Image: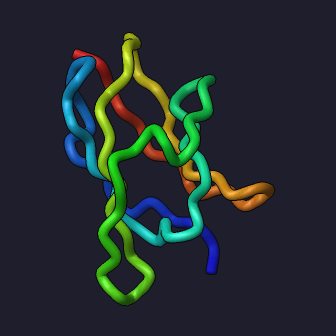
Amino acid sequence: MSLQIDSIDPARGTQGDEVTLTGTLLRAQALRWGDQEWDETFWEGGASSGNGATEIFFQVPPGEGTVQIMAVNGDDRSNVVEFTYV
């Protein structure tokens, strides 16, 4: 099963806000946040819904503009969603 991000909530915010990614993310070992890669210690945990969907919760790191977010597991990469700093 490939990695897939179905939604990001919220898609806009500021440093320290909590963001939730939802999708097929059970195998995610890292998140790419712009040009940074964060391992599993970056997020607070996941909650499986039993059908392969997972929520990953994390706090927005420092930054500005719009960044692309992608889940990663080795060579397996999810689609990209965007987060905009306001």
- Compare residues 42 and 11 and report the one nearer the observer: 42
Q: Position of residue 61 (x, y in %)?
A: 37, 22
Residue 53 vs 86, above or below: the answer is below
The image quadrant of residue 37 is top right
The image quadrant of residue 73 is bottom right
The image quadrant of residue 85 is top left
Q: Position of residue 49 (x, y in %)?
A: 30, 81
Quarter that holds the N terminus: bottom right
Say which residue appears at 44% left-offset and 82% top-offset: 52
Say which residue appears at 72% left-offset and 61% top-offset: 76
Q: Residue furthest bottom?
A: 51
Tell me the colour scheme of the image: rainbow
- Compare residues 5 and 74 and report the one nearer the observer: 74
Say which residue appears at 29% left-offset and 33% top-offset: 59
Q: Position of residue 79 (x, y in %)?
A: 56, 55
Q: Position of residue 32 (x, y in %)?
A: 58, 37
**For this view, does 75 lie left or right of residue 48?**
right
Quarter that holds the C terminus: top left
Q: Residue furthest right?
A: 75
Q: Residue furthest front?
A: 41
**For this view, does 21 lie left or right of residue 75?**
left
Residue 35 vs 32, above or below: the answer is above
Say which residue appears at 38% left-offset and 11% top-offset: 64
